[in-house]
Structures are given as structure tokens and as C-alpha cells.
Amino acid sequence: MFDISPSEGQLNYRFSGHETFACRYAWLPKAYRAISANSSIFYDEDAAMVELGIGKNMVRALRFWVDAMGIARPTSERKHEITDLGHTVFGTDGCDPYLEDSKTLWLLHWNLSSAATPALFAWHYLLGAWPYAEFSRSEALTAFARQSQRLGHSHSEITLSQHLDVFLHTYLSARGSRSGLEDSLDGPLVELQLLQQTGERRSEGGRWEAVYAFRKEPKDNISDELFAYAVLDYWERTSPGEKTLPIRQILSAAGSPGQSFKLPEDDVRARLERLSLDPRYGFTYRPSAIQGLLTREGPIRVDARAIYTNEADING
């Protein structure tokens, strides 16, 4: 079993803050409009409840998702500042204000799975470090408890269980469950069909439980422009001063494009080869079965709008 060790220099992790609520479809557009009108709205929960039409715990959850999905960032003045991505998607000339484009959903997923300041534990571990093809809820929960302890935390089983359930609910439909109507509303990332139930098996306690697996295959709705954005964003986050980046890191490191999007190695290499032939992306690809490198000359500038316009204006 893969272990996350504190000695790896790995960042802090978030295990909570979502108040047990996965993000809902209507939440992010509502939050964008509310912050645009009042940048302090999330620091006045009573006002936020009235403005957004949701309960206090949901307000706190939405504040969490706005940050985790990269739509807005909290400032030292107890305000939120909308990010370039937030304006690109939800602004007055936004590219996808109603979350109708799968590219937007993959972008939101990218921010969740690649975040490093701090990383969301379930996303970092299950997408980036889980060593097996499948997992059950009990297997993941046992691993969560072990990793939490190794990292020096003392999380309760309830906290870890809720964090795992939010991850599952983010990608799996709750339709047909016995939960109430409000609790069964699916979030936008369910449409990606990234996580799927593949069967059932008995747990150590003898109960039957679902078995899940990520859909690891080429994905046509992840365009080359979107993939290039993720590669350059990952490069800037993890190695901003480096002129080269090993292909293996893009393929298999936790939080990398290959792992976050669950793309096969040959698909990643084919994408990098195509992109390196276009000078607008600013990097070259040196293939190698053992290592392989990406090399760039100038600074990195990522612009999400290029994903929608197909202008490839990603590297300044």
C-alpha cells in the first residue's frame, strides 16, 4: 500500500471544510454573482444565507468549494477576490456561466485534484496515490485512517468517513438513494463519469459493498487545449523555475495531468507530441521510453479562455 510520508515535503491537507456537502450545480454561479456584488458576503453568514437562499452549513460549504475549485480566493481583508478563471467562466462575457460545457467541468476537477495549497486529501490520495485498480469504501476508509496517523493527525472515523463520502458524492450520482430530495441532488462533476461502480464484494466484516474504479481511457472531451493548460499550470505550480520537466512526472505524480484526468500513458505521450509541434504552446517534447523530457524557453502564462476559443493563447 502506498503511504504518504510527512518527510516527502508534501503540503498540508484538507480533510474537512465542506460541511459534508458536495458542490451543487447552482452554487458556483450563485457564489460568483454574490461575491461580485459584495466581496465580503461569505464573512457575514446571515447575509449570505439570505442572498444565496441556502442554510448556514451550506454557506460554509459553498465558501469551501469556491476556494477549492479556484473560482475566488479569500484575502487578508476578510473578502473574496474572484480569480481569472472565475471571470472567464461566469463573467458578463463568460464562456460557460451555466456549466454546460464539459471543458469547464474538467477544469473544476483539475483544480480539485491538482490543488497543493493545501491539497484535498481524498482527491490527492485516491486520484494520485491509490496503488490498486479498484477500491471499496471500507478499503479506502482504512487507508485514510492509516495515512492520517502517519501525517501526525488524529482525525476521527466520522471526519474521515464524511470526507470520503463527499469525494464519492462529487463523482457518483445519488439518484435512487434513500436520501431526501435536497441531499440527492447531483453535482456537476457527476457528468464526467470519471468514477464508476464496477461491482460488489464482501468486506472484512462480511457485508457486501460497492467496488469503484476510475475510468482510465482516452477522453475526447479533454481537448488538447485543456490538456496543455493543465500541463503548464502543473509545471508552474510544482516547478516554476525549471526549464525541463520529466514526462514521468506528468504521467504519474500525484496531482499531475495524467493522474488527475486518468489518461493512459500512450494517450498522454501522443498529446504531448502533438502539442510540442505547435510553437504557440512554448514547449518541446523529447520522447524516451525510460524518461523523456519537456523543455521550455520562456516564462509560463496560463489563460483558461484559450481553452474555449481554441486560440492556444496559453503561453505568453
Image: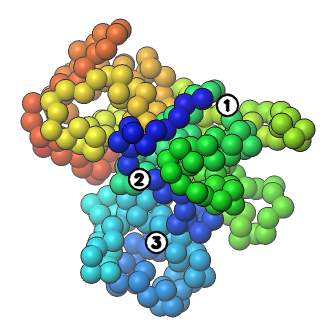
Q: Is residue 209 left or right of residue 74?
A: right
Q: Is residue 44 left or right of residue 232?
A: right
Identify which amino acid the numbered label 2 is placed on.
Asn
Location of mark 3 (residue): 63
Identify which amino acid the numbered label 3 is placed on.
Arg
Q: Are marks 3 and 1 in contact (CB under 8 Å)?
A: no
What mark, if any, has residue 95 been given in the picture? none
Within-10-Å neighbours for mark 2: few <14, some 14–19, many 20+? some
What mark, if any, has residue 12 been given in the picture? 2
Q: Secondary structure at mark 3?
A: helix
Location of mark 1 (residue): 134
Q: Residue at x 71, y 39 (%)?
A: 139
Within-10-Å neighbours for mark 3: few <14, some 14–19, many 20+? many
Q: Are marks 2 and 3 in contact (CB under 8 Å)?
A: no
Q: Position of residue 130 (x, y in %)?
A: 57, 33
Q: CA distance from mark 2 to mark 3?
A: 19 Å
Q: Position of residue 131 (x, y in %)?
A: 58, 28
- Residue 46's place in the image compared with 292, above or below, is below
